Image (cartoon, rainbow, N blue to C red):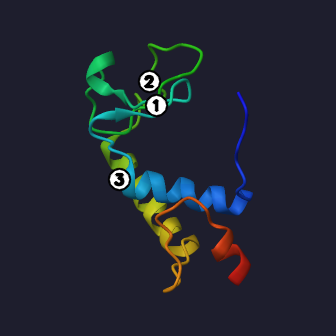
């Protein structure tokens, strides 16, 4: 697979935080690295209220299966706080697109 990534590691970090705080649907989707399309919880019969993370080596194993709702709430809060800390939003830059070069050049 060809890698077309042009983002720095810092920009990738910001995009990771943005995706998992603003876009990812935790109630319906599973975090997976083996496919691009969203993997639905009902496809695997995983219905826990916390995040679901597919083990890339044992596909029937939910890596977050033992995560309590309380600890999941703490993790989500940390993601949100990190997004607020690292996600610099400048007025004249559209950060809805993954190209963060304009922001990096202003720092």
Q: Residues within 10 Å of mark 2 (few under 14, many from 20)?
A: some
Which numbered disc, 1 or 3, marks the residue that appears first in the sequence? 1
Q: Quadrant of the C terminus?
A: bottom right
Is label 2 in contact with label 3 (beta carbons under 8 Å)? no
Q: Could you say which is closer to the camera, residue 6 or residue 56?
A: 6
Residue 6, how many percent across, how many down? Answer: 72, 54
Residue 23, how many percent across, how many down? Answer: 38, 52
Q: Nearer the viewer, mark 2 or mark 3?
A: 2
Alpha carbon separation for disc pair 2 and 1: 5 Å
Residue carrying label 3: 73
Q: Is residue 35 left or right of residue 5?
A: left
Residue carrying label 2: 62
Q: Could you say which is closer to the camera, residue 10 or residue 67?
A: 10
The answer to whether residue 51 is visible is: yes
Q: Residue at x 30, y 23 (%)?
A: 46
Alpha carbon separation for disc pair 1 and 3: 16 Å
Which numbered disc, 2 or 3, marks the residue that appears first in the sequence? 2
Q: Residues within 10 Å of mark 3 (few under 14, many from 20)?
A: few
Alpha carbon separation for disc pair 2 and 3: 18 Å
In the picture, the disc for residue 53 is: 1
In the picture, the disc for residue 35 is: none
Q: Residue at x 58, y 62 (%)?
A: 14
Q: Nearer the viewer, mark 1 or mark 3?
A: 1
Residue 86, how many percent across, how many down? Answer: 58, 71
Residue 10, how many percent across, how many down? Answer: 69, 62
Q: Residue at x 46, y 65 (%)?
A: 96
| SS class, disc 1 | loop
| SS class, disc 2 | loop
Give the vertical position of 36 relative to 56 (above or below).
Answer: below
Q: Residue at x 38, y 38 (%)?
A: 51
Which numbered disc, 2 or 1, marks the residue that appears first in the sequence? 1
């Amino acid at each position: 697979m060809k890698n077309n990534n042009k983002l720095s590691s810092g920009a990738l970090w910001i995009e990771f935080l943005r995706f998992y705080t603003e876009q990812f649907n935790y109630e319906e989707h599973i975090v997976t690295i083996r496919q691009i399309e969203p993997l639905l919880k009902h496809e695997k019969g995983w219905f826990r209220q916390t995040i679901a993370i597919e083990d890339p080596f044992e596909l029937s194993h939910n890596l977050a299966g033992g995560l309590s709702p309380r600890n999941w709430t703490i993790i989500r809060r940390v993601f949100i706080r990190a997004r607020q800390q690292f996600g610099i939003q400048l007025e004249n830059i559209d950060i809805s697109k993954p190209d963060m070069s304009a922001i990096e050049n202003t720092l």
